[in-house]
Amino acid sequence: MARRRRRLRRPRGTTELAAAGLVTLAAAALLLQAVEAGARAAARYWPVLAALAAVAAVGATVWWVRRWAAVRVRAERLATLRLSLAGIDTLGDQEFEFALRDLLVRDGWSARKVGQQGDQAADVIGQHPALGRIVLQAKHTKVGAKVGSQVMYQVKGTAGPAHGADIAVVVTNGSFTRDAKAWGDKHAVHWVDRDRLRLWAEHGLALHDLLRLPPRASRRGLGRPTA
C-alpha cells in the first residue's frame, strides 16, 4: 500500500504565525552574521587572498603558454616529417632504420644509421646536447608479431659498453611480449611498440617526450665505459 505524502501546511492561527516569523528572523540573523564574518575575514586577509589569486592567474597563464607552445612545436615537427603506420608497415628493414634516423633528426637529435652485419644491437645512434647519446635497435616485423626478451638482453649488454650510450631503445612496428616490456622497464631499456610508434611518427610527439627521458645528469647509466 503506497504511503501518503506529507504536505507542509501553512501556519494557522496567531501563535503559529508568530512562531514562523521568529524562526524566519532567527535564520535571517544567522545568515547576516555569517556574511558579516566572511566580510571581516576577507578584509583582514585580503592581501593573502589577492596573492593567491595572482599566483593562480600566473600559473594558468604559464600553463596555457606552454600548452600552445607544445602544439606549435608538434605542428612544426609534422610539417618536417610525418610517417604513417601503414607506410611504415610497407618498408623493408633497411628503410625502417633510415626512417627511425629521420624521426630522431626531426626531433632535434643528430643521428646516423649504423645497422649492418655485426652491429652489436645498434641500428641508429643519436646525440642530443641535453639528453646524451641514444641507441635504437629496430625490429621491423609483420603486424601482430611480438619482440621477445632476448632482444632486450642484447641491447642492454651492448648499448653502454659497446656504443657508449646513455639511452637504449628497441623500436618495432609490432608489439612486445609482457616479459620483454617488464624486463625493459626494470633494466632501463626503453621500448616503442606499435601504439607508441604511431604517436611518434604519425602524431609528431618527440621520442624524448614520449619516453619521458630525463636529462643525462639525472639518469641511471647503462654501464658506459669510462674514459
Image (cartoon, helix red, strand yellow):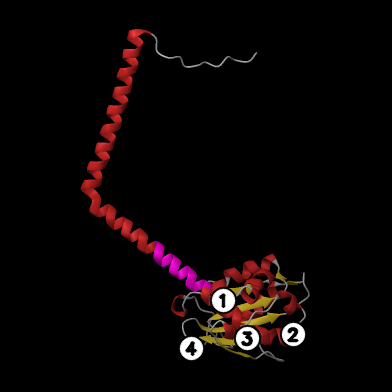
Read off the residue under disc 4.
226
Dot 4: within a 10 Å radius of its alpha carbon, few (fewer than 14), some, or many (20 or more) residues?
few
**Distance from label 2 to label 1 (Cα)?**
28 Å
Which residue lies at the image location 63% right of the left edge and 80% below the top edge?
Answer: 155
In the rendered image, which quarter contains the N terminus? top right
Look at discs 3 and 2 and give the one toward the viewer.
Answer: 3
Q: Which tag, 4 or 3, sits closer to the chain's start? A: 3
Q: Is residue 163 positioned above or below 50 on the image?
A: below
Which residue lies at the image location 29% right of the left edge and 23% below the top edge?
Answer: 25
Is residue 26 visible in the rendered image? The answer is yes
Q: Which tag, 3 or 2, sits closer to the chain's start? A: 2
- The magenta stretch spans which residues? 60-71
Read off the residue under disc 3.
102
Read off the residue under disc 1.
75
**With 212 as the anchor, is 146 left or right in this view?**
right
Q: Residue 93, which numbered label?
A: 2
Instruction: Find numbered disc 4 in the image and state the secondary structure of the residue it sits on.
Output: loop
Residue 125 percent coordinates (x, y): 59, 87
Depth check, front residue: 65 or 215: 65
Q: Residue 18, which numbered label?
A: none
Q: Which tag, 4 or 1, sits closer to the chain's start? A: 1
Amino acid type of the residue tagged 4 in the rendering: Thr
Instruction: Find numbered disc 3 in the image and state the secondary structure of the residue it sits on.
Output: helix
Is residue 135 visible in the rendered image? The answer is no
Determine contact: label 2, label 4, CB under 8 Å: no
Dot 1: within a 10 Å radius of its alpha carbon, few (fewer than 14), some, or many (20 or more) residues?
some
Dot 3: within a 10 Å radius of its alpha carbon, few (fewer than 14), some, or many (20 or more) residues?
many
**Distance from label 1 to label 3 (Cα)?**
16 Å
Which residue lies at the image location 64% right of the left edge and 68% below the top edge?
Answer: 181
Residue 71 percent coordinates (x, y): 53, 72
**Distance from label 3 to label 2 (Cα)?**
14 Å
